[in-house]
Amino acid sequence: MERLKTYFLLTALTLLFIFVGGALAGQTGMVIAFVAAAGMNFYAYYYSDQQVLKHYHAHPVDRRTAPGLYRIVEGLTRRAGLPMPALYILPDEQPNAFATGRDYHHAAVAVTEGLLNLLSEEEVEAVVAHELSHIKHYDMLIGTVAATIAGAISMLANFGMFFGGNNDDDRPNFIVTLALMFLAPMAAGIIQMTVSRRREFMADEGSARMTGHPEWLQSALSKLDHYAQGTLIPEAEPQTAHMFIINPFTGTDISLRQLFSTHPTTEQRIEHLERLKQER
């Protein structure tokens, strides 16, 4: 069911991209958008995970090189009924983590050195369970493609004034083009924010149920948010910020302008976990 939901959402995003192309440049724009969407989806599906890991200088670890982390992940995957993902460590001071990969058998969990140095073993387990919940629900693929298409829609809208058909009938109406230049990026951003925020809550809930201890993730989130205020991942990019358990731009102005809404506030997430504790 989760895979079906994933493919449905990806299809909807692709159709939105094609619709914007058609609205801006008629049939020509639809063809260009279709070809571009097909290429982006193919690349995002097969190669985005390795590109992200390479971008953040992640190095692989195993049972021998990171026995504590490996043991935690191995126990959680057994409990969740998931294959063992590839494990990576990012050489960054900011405590953070993310998951990537297209499916259960091509998944990876990456944590920063700062996270391993800061959190207790129980808190690391809660964070890893959060990332495994993303894997279980195919959130990594949805987030990657949503971000890719959202960015492409913005770019398409910005260039809408400069392309069209070869005749006046196929060329977009100026008012329609002007409206789409503002509304299309906004719609794409709302889609990306909605997908990211809702799935962060779902992954938090998945972590609480996987570990049986919502308070572990509450404590971890509080620490991660506090320490993120004073540190920065140098390679962090707006396009990949939604992947992290805590917004890597928390301590900068850019978080307020562009990225704040890709994550619920830490207070909202802790409150949500508190309600789960009361349901037990």
Image (cartoon, rainbow, N blue to C red):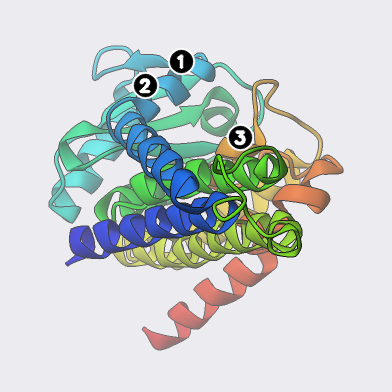
- Helix, strand or loop under label 1: helix
* Vertical side of 50 occupied by 110: above or below: below
Q: Which residue is mark 1?
A: 54
Q: Quadrant of the N terminus?
A: bottom left
Left or right: 13, with 226 as reference point = left
Cα distance in 3D space between marks 3 and 2 = 21 Å
Q: Quadrant of the C terminus?
A: bottom left
Quick check: 98 left or right of 225?
left
Label 1 with label 2: CB-CB less than 8 Å: yes
Residue displayed at 51% across by 13% down: 57
Proximity of marks 3 and 2: CB atoms separated by less than 8 Å? no
Q: Nearer the viewer, residue 112 or 50?
A: 50
Q: Residue at x 33, y 66 (%)?
A: 212
- Residue 189, horizontal then vertical, whole percent: 62, 57
Q: Give the Cα separation between the discs numbered 1 and 3.
A: 18 Å
On the rendered structure, is 99 left or right of 107? right
Residue 62 in the image: x percent, y percent? 26, 18
Mark 3 highlights which residue? 95
User: Disc 2 marks which residue?
Assistant: 50
The amino acid on which the numbered mark 2 sits, given as a three-letter code, is: Gln
In this view, which residue lies farthest toward the bottom? Answer: 279
How many discs mark residues in the rendered view? 3
At horizontal 45% and vertical 66% (from top left) the residue drawn is 214
Residue at 66% in and 54% down: 185
**Residue 52 visible somewhere in the drawing:** yes
Q: Label 1 amino acid?
A: Lys
Between 125 and 6, the one lying in front of the other is 6
Q: Please, is residue 209 above or below residue 53 in the view?
A: below
